[in-house]
Amino acid sequence: MQLTDRKIGFIGTGKMGESLIRGILGAHSEISIYASDVYEPALERLNKELGINVSTENASTIMNSDIVVLAIKPQILKDILAQIKDDITSDKLVISIAAGVPVAAIEDELNSDARVIRVMPNIAATVAEAASAICTGTNATAEDAEVALAIFRSLGSAIQIPEKLMDAVTGLSGSGPAYIFPVIEAMADGAVHEGLDRASAITLAAQTVLGAAKMVLETGMHPGELKDMVTSPAGTTIRGIHTLEESGVRAAFMNAVIASSERSKELGK
Ligand SMILES: NC(=O)C1=CN([C@@H]2O[C@H](COP(=O)(O)OP(=O)(O)OC[C@H]3O[C@@H](n4cnc5c(N)ncnc54)[C@H](O)[C@@H]3O)[C@@H](O)[C@H]2O)C=CC1
Ligand SMILES: O=C(O)[C@@H]1CCC=N1
């Protein structure tokens, strides 16, 4: 299966649509991308910067594409599906990235033979480091799942999961970059407090998060074991860890993931 033979269309070129387009072009510069949005200045900018085909007509994007990515807000998805229903023929694969919206709710708005896949990517697709999960709808074939996995693996990592776990993934990796950006900023703030310049502090904080993540992924070791490798008896790190534990940092992060997952469930109702 050659991804580069497929034409990919985006309905919605906001933050996530643009992130995915940039990521895909970074991985496969020769792929044909079509995109539509109601906001013309964004389309013009993307056409100028990335050379993609743009239109204010969703029907035009769909007509030109084999794969149609729905990158619009969950709250307007139903209305847009009603508008594009008859343009989505069974030869097209529909990929929805809308948080919370179940595949069945999308299928209900389209013709009965529509091939639908639901994906939860994240904003790090922009730099080909997204963490994505996919699940398939009633008519999506095994090849469709392979195509979706190939697209999202070219933007980072991607796994296939049962749909009932999509809300958990949304709370974890879909929203997760936004939990970590303030962590990087706050760690840098601490070093600025101690006299380091802002730019160096942000670079060191970000590289520290990147390096820690890479160690978890590449060594396969448990994060707790890796933490112990840094923590010398009566050293500096255990002092910092003690302070974090006193602040309830673990409960705070667990609660963030749980709250976000709950919101994803609400969006699906
Ligand atoms: N921002 C993120 O990090 C992530 C977002 N998502 C999902 O991606 C989807 C898009 O989210 P964002 O990009 O953050 O929102 P956004 O608001 O930045 O982008 C939505 C875009 O849809 C466009 N739009 C509105 N009406 C339209 C219409 N009738 N036809 C075509 N385009 C139309 C808007 O002009 C806007 O550019 C949402 O469903 C969200 O749940 C999923 C994972 C991560
Ligand atoms: O905040 C949101 O609703 C979207 C979905 C996951 C990340 N951003």
Image: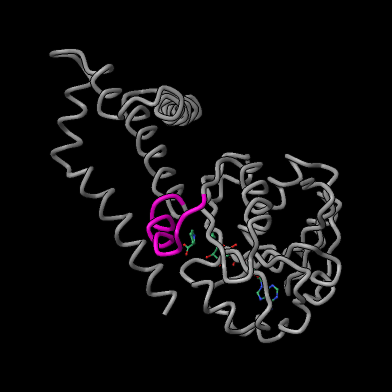
- Whether residue 199 is situated above or below residue 41 in the rendered picture: above
Residue 168 lies within the magenta run:
yes
| Magenta part, dominant SS | helix
The foreground one among 43 and 253 is: 253
- Whether residue 32 is situated above or below residue 213 in the rendered picture: below
- Whether residue 28 is situated above or below residue 175 in the rendered picture: above
Q: Please give left or right for residue 168 compared with residue 5 in the image.
A: left
Residue projecting furthest to the front: 142
Placement of the C terminus among the 4 image quadrants: bottom left
Q: Report the residue at 57% width, 63% height from top.
A: 97
Give the percent coordinates (x, y) of residue 195: 36, 23
Corner quadrant of residue 268: bottom left
Corner quadrant of residue 241: top left
Give the percent coordinates (x, y) of residue 117: 60, 64
State which region is magenta: 160-173
The foreground one among 168 and 113 is: 113
Q: Please give left or right for residue 255 compared with residue 112 in the image.
A: left
Residue 73 lies within the magenta run:
no
Q: Please give left or right for residue 230 compared with residue 131 in the image.
A: left
Corner quadrant of residue 62: bottom right
Q: Please give left or right for residue 91 compared with residue 154 in the image.
A: right
Give the percent coordinates (x, y) of residue 163: 45, 63
The foreground one among 133 and 237 is: 133
Q: Report the residue at 83% width, 70% height from top.
A: 55
Q: Report the residue at 51% width, 45% height from top.
A: 131
Q: Report the residue at 17% width, 24% height from top.
A: 239
